[in-house]
Amino acid sequence: MLPDAVREQNRQGTPGTTVYVAGALRAVESFLMRGGQQTARRNAWAAVCEDRRRARDRHEAQSVLESLAGSRGSGPWAG
């Protein structure tokens, strides 16, 4: 009996071997790249965290600059 995914592929006119080949390639990739994928995920997460930190810092700096620009016209040094 064929798995549901293969039967669905056959109904759509796509050869069922495509599912087997794709599954086999995914299995080989996950076996060979296991450690690399973990490292890649850690690196990606670190990059996301760093981007969020920079965005927070940028937002904070922008808020400070806007508050300074707003108070500039009303301070004792305003001309």
Image (spheres, rainbow, N blue to C red):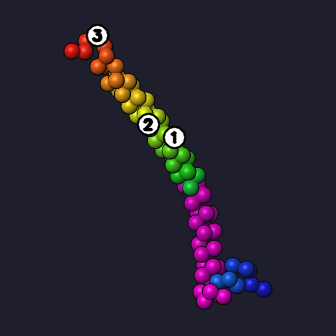
Q: Where is residue 3 in the image (x, y as percent from the top left)?
A: 74, 80
Question: Does the magenta portion include 63?
Answer: no
Question: Does the magenta portion include 21?
Answer: yes
Label of residue 54 in the image = 2
Read off the magenta span. Answer: 10-36
Q: Mark 3 points at which residue?
A: 76
Q: Which amino acid does label 3 sit on?
A: Pro
Left/right placement of residue 73 relative to residue 2 reads left
> Which is nearer the eye, 78 or 19?
78
User: Of helix, strand and loop, which one carries label 2?
Assistant: helix
Q: Can residue 63 be seen in this view?
A: yes
Q: State which tag comes first along the sequence, 1 or 2.
A: 1
Q: In which quarter of the image is residue 5?
A: bottom right
Find the distance from the CA under tag 3 to the CA under tag 2.
Answer: 34 Å
Q: Position of residue 78 (x, y in %)?
A: 25, 15
Q: Which amino acid does label 1 sit on?
A: Cys
Residue at the image position 70 percent from the left and 84 percent from the top:
7
Q: Position of residue 75 (x, y in %)?
A: 31, 13
Label of residue 49 in the image = 1
Q: Magenta part mainly helix, strand or loop?
A: helix
